[in-house]
């Protein structure tokens, strides 16, 4: 998935069971609960220095943008978005690093609305 504002292909894990050091610091981590999703950039939090930082985090629910948070050096590389998680089938997040480009991760959720 590529955000409207980006023209580059998003990077993600090549092997999620053996992530590289670059992947550990750039792939967004999604933590959903019932009413929101917390997104943190990196299993190892990304640095937020004047010459190397995450410019924004954007969250998508079922392919539609939920919101985008622009970040500045010195801020935490994380954001929380309100989402009706029980009605959502797929979440994805993108993060743009000023040095290493666009990164993405997605998770598929079990439908809580399934009829038995």
Image (cartoon, helix red, strand yellow):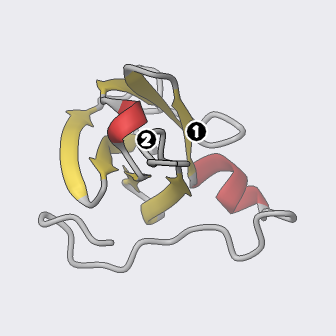
Q: Disc 1 or 2, which lies upstream in sequence?
A: 1
**Which residue is situated farthest in the left direction here?**
4
Q: Position of residue 22 (x, y in %)?
A: 68, 60
- Residue 76 located left or right of residue 27: left
Dot 1: element: loop
Mark 2 Cα-neighbour bin, 10 Å: few <14, some 14–19, many ≥20? many
Q: Disc 1 versus disc 2: distance between alpha carbons?
A: 7 Å
- Residue 99 located left or right of residue 24: left
**In front of the other: 22 or 83:** 83
**In front of the other: 25 or 59:** 59
Residue at image coords 31%, 27%? 81
Write down the quadrant of residue 75 in the picture. top left
Mark 1 Cα-neighbour bin, 10 Å: few <14, some 14–19, many ≥20? many
Dot 2: element: loop
Judging by the rendered image, the residue that carries numbered circle 1 is: 46
Vertical side of 50 occupied by 12: above or below: below
Judging by the rendered image, the residue that carries numbered circle 2 is: 53
Residue at image coords 46%, 45%? 52
Vertical side of 5 occupied by 37: above or below: above
Residue at image coords 77%, 73%? 15
**Which residue is situated farthest in the right direction here?**
18
Residue at image coords 31%, 29%? 84
**In front of the other: 16 or 82:** 82
Vertical side of 47 occupied by 24: above or below: below
Disc tally is: 2
Q: Which mark is residue 87?
A: none
Q: Position of residue 7 (x, y in %)?
A: 21, 78
Q: Position of residue 106 (x, y in %)?
A: 50, 57
User: In the rendered image, which quarter contains the N terminus?
Assistant: bottom left
Q: Residues at badges 1 and 2 in contact (C-beta under 8 Å)?
A: yes
């Amino acid at each position: 998935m590529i955000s409207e504002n980006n023209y580059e292909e998003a990077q993600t894990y090549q092997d999620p069971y053996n992530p590289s050091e670059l992947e550990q610091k750039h792939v967004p981590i999604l933590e959903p609960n019932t009413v929101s999703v917390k997104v943190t950039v990196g299993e190892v939090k990304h640095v937020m220095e004047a010459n190397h930082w995450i410019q924004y985090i954007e969250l998508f629910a079922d392919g539609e943008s939920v919101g985008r948070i622009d970040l500045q050096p010195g801020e935490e590389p994380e954001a929380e978005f309100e989402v009706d998680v029980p009605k959502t089938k797929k979440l994805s997040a993108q993060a743009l690093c000023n040095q290493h480009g666009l990164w993405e991760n997605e998770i598929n959720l079990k439908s809580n609305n399934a009829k038995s």
